[in-house]
Image: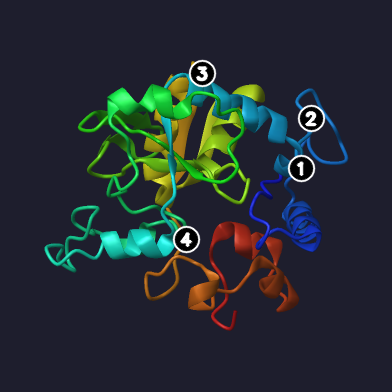
Amino acid sequence: MRIEDLDPERSRQAYVEGAMEDLRWLGIRWQEGPKLGGSYAPYVQSERRASYLNAWRKLLWGGYLFPCRCSRKDLEAALSAPHESASTGVNGPQNNKELEPLDDEPVYPGSCRPGASRSDSLMSGIDEPEGFNWRFRVPDGEAIEFHDENLGPQRFVAGRDFGDFVVWRRDGSPSYQLACVADDAAMKITEVVRGEDLLKSTARQILLYRALGFENPRWFHCRLVVDANGHRLAKRHDALSLRILRQRGVSRAEILSGELPREA
């Protein structure tokens, strides 16, 4: 059990306790984690900053990163160029926008990306990431391919399907991509199981694994649970939480089977 609590706006101890209680109610148990300890403690990401800094420095010294001063507003303006159509956008054809993760990054327009000749001089003397968004420079045009244990062969092209992505935010927090890769490698994770909306994140993380010299785990991406309208279950669609279902008397067996009563 690993608590990923790097987003200060979404992380509360009450949420952690609630999630652990819900998992226990479902009959899920773990052998390592918060309060239990284990060989790879601590199991709370907010307590693992030193590990993420080491990974950031290794990427920086390897020439993989560059600082970005762009605000979200700057990027939105750059990505709203007149030649981009609503149906295509910067990521190419939008086959199923509901499967895009809420924090998925659009393809970076390259506003702050330095030329290769400027990269080394720009990084000299830097030892801390604060003050910038730090982006990983993707190898444009390279196809990132991997076999998913559930969905089969996957292929994403760097610079087209995803661009230079954030690994450290200007607020001083490492990104989901960097933290997960550093933790999975440190904890010797051999199989990563998550939702299919994170397939593109896996392509990004494969680049990080390679740059950091880590061995890739196996990947298994699950189909998403959706509502009657085909929307994935999310707060923005007023989806029912596990806690609400419990309060309404839905049994553990009904939830695990996926066959919920109509009145739920």
Quadrant of image for the C terminus: bottom right
The residue most toward the left is 83
CB within 8 Å, label 4 to label 3: no
Q: Which residue is mark 1?
A: 29
Mark whose residue sits in front, 4 or 3: 3
The numbered disc on residue 225 is 4
Q: Is residue 216 visible?
A: no
Q: Secondary structure at mark 1?
A: loop
Q: Earlier in the sequence, mark 2 or mark 4?
A: 2
Decide if residue 70 is on the left or right side of residue 246: left
User: In the rendered image of this protein, does residue 190 appear above or below residue 23?
Assistant: above
Q: Is residue 143 visible?
A: yes
Q: Secondary structure at mark 4?
A: loop
Q: Residues within 10 Å of mark 4 (few under 14, many from 20)?
A: few
For the point 56% across and 71% down, the residue is: 260
Q: Quadrant of residue 36?
A: top right
User: In the rendered image of this protein, does residue 182 appear above or below residue 233?
Assistant: above
Decide if residue 155 is on the left or right side of residue 205: left
Label 4 sits on what residue type? Answer: Val
Label 1 sits on what residue type? Answer: Arg
Q: Secondary structure at mark 2?
A: loop
Q: Position of residue 101 (x, y in %)?
A: 43, 56
Quadrant of image for the N terminus: top right
Q: Which residue is mark 2?
A: 41
Q: CA distance from mark 2 to mark 4?
A: 32 Å
**68, 5: nearer the viewer:** 68
